[in-house]
Amino acid sequence: MKTCSACFRLFSQDSGFCPVDGQRLIPVAQASPPRHPDDRRVGATLCGGRYQVWRIVADGGMGRVYQALDLQAGRSVALKILHPEVALDEVSVERFHREFEVSASLPHEHIVEVLGFEKTEDDSFALVMEYLEGEELRTVLKRDKVLPPERLVRMLSQVALGLVEAHERKVVHRDLKPDNIFLVGTHDGDRVKILDFGSVRDNSEGAKKLTVVGTTIGSPFYMSPEQAQGLLALDHRADVWSVAAIVFECVTGRVPFHASTGPMILVSIMGSNPLPPSEAGKAYGAPASLDPVMEAAFMKSPEARLPSVGLLADRVGQAYGLAGSHRDWAHMPQKELAARIRAAMPAVLARHQHGSASAGAAPAGAERPPIAAVAAPSPGATDAFAEDIVMGVPQRLPRWVVPALASAAVLLCALVALLIAR
């Protein structure tokens, strides 16, 4: 192994120069890891002397990630070590250990490889993983706002391949978001790695449950309605919703559901419909052919939703005019995908426009029907109609609520005044 004397990244023996700093690399045997004034782990050797820590890579809510040298295997690894306060929580430690168990049981080229689970000398716990050089999808979106279609299709196809085995085993990731999609650059395009299986729901028979009934797990912007409610009946179709939310953001530059607080985001998810991608992403040229795909992926009822991430990937690719399936596109060179999409899109858009005109589609900006069908209102309920209630949460308050609350407030004030007068 070699290292850079400026940034202390670790590289393979055949590397010559650091791509970040341009420095000539030197063998690790001729260098010493640096020390960090605020982190005694940097420069130390952990887990019984096996892992030599060279630098801090990232910080998260659960722990800190380091790049380390595995002195036994002679390779670079990532150590994800729990923060001290998190390491004191038994449930958090159990989730961390389950991340190791689930990831280790799902070896796949598009899931990060997990190598070990260790106790550290400072009474914390470390997850040992393959070290990846690249960037999270979140970083790309912050910089570029959206992805070009060819990059989106290739990435989504690889995500679908990575999730298929987990879903077949009844394992739900439950925290899919741009932060957990890692992109490793190659000559042909991104190589995708799915990260962080610490929030999984294992629906297999006899699996241990770590989530209290009614608890919501996941990131609000990418959470399905059934996740938002903490329902027991939650399966792989919750991941379909989350991946659809990622796709929506990749083509529009914005999340499909937004509000100022976490609870309000969840209310929005359960009680409203997102804009069509062609409208929300008009500035970025999101095609109208994606609109029905997203509508099918954002169905409130899991039974009505697209049934798999693979089918979602197929529908997205077809919306860009591609023939075949996600298995064909996952490793197709990005340049070839771009050429195929450019050649096919004029015909796709023409067909979509013709189909919309034939169906008498409502003009842009017109109110759309609700995505999810719900029970009809009871007889005489003239102020309520189907789209008022979705998944048991009102989309808007019935007209009688405000007057009733106002009357109650007046009565309460009168009662308080009476008590004070006495």
Image (tube, rainbow, N blue to C red):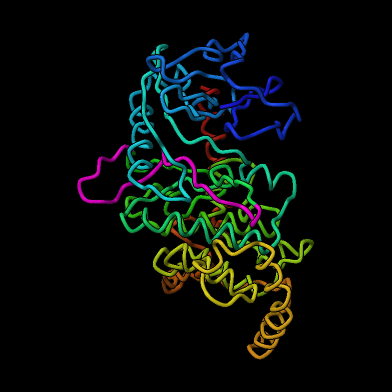
342 inside magenta stretch: no
Q: Taking 366 as reference, is 208 above or below it?
A: above
In the image, what residue occupies the spot 73% across and 62% down? 281
Q: Taking 160 as reference, is 314 above or below it?
A: below
Q: Nearer the viewer, residue 87 or 332?
A: 332
| Range covered by the magenta-colored residues | 187-210
Dominant secondary structure of the residues highlighted in magenta in the image: loop
Say whether residue 388 is visible: yes
Q: Taking 245 as reference, is 369 above or below it?
A: below
193 inside magenta stretch: yes
Residue farthest along the bottom direction in this orientation? 358
Q: Nearer the viewer, residue 8 or 15?
A: 15
Q: Nearer the viewer, residue 49 or 225?
A: 49
In the image, what residue occupies the spot 48% across and 54% down? 224
Q: Quadrant of residue 162?
A: bottom left
Name the side, left or right, on which 168 lies relative to 307. Answer: left
Residue 31, percent from left and from top = 61, 15
Name the side, left or right, on which 19 lies relative to 313. Answer: right
Residue 210, percent from left and from top = 31, 37
Q: Quadrant of residue 85?
A: top left
In the image, what residue occupies the spot 60% across and 35% down? 14
Q: Nearer the viewer, residue 333 or 284?
A: 333
Residue 384, percent from left and from top = 51, 67
State which quarter of the image contains the N terminus.
top right
Residue 301, percent from left and from top = 43, 64
Say whether residue 384 is visible: no
Q: How many marks?
A: 0
Residue farthest along the front direction in this orientation? 14
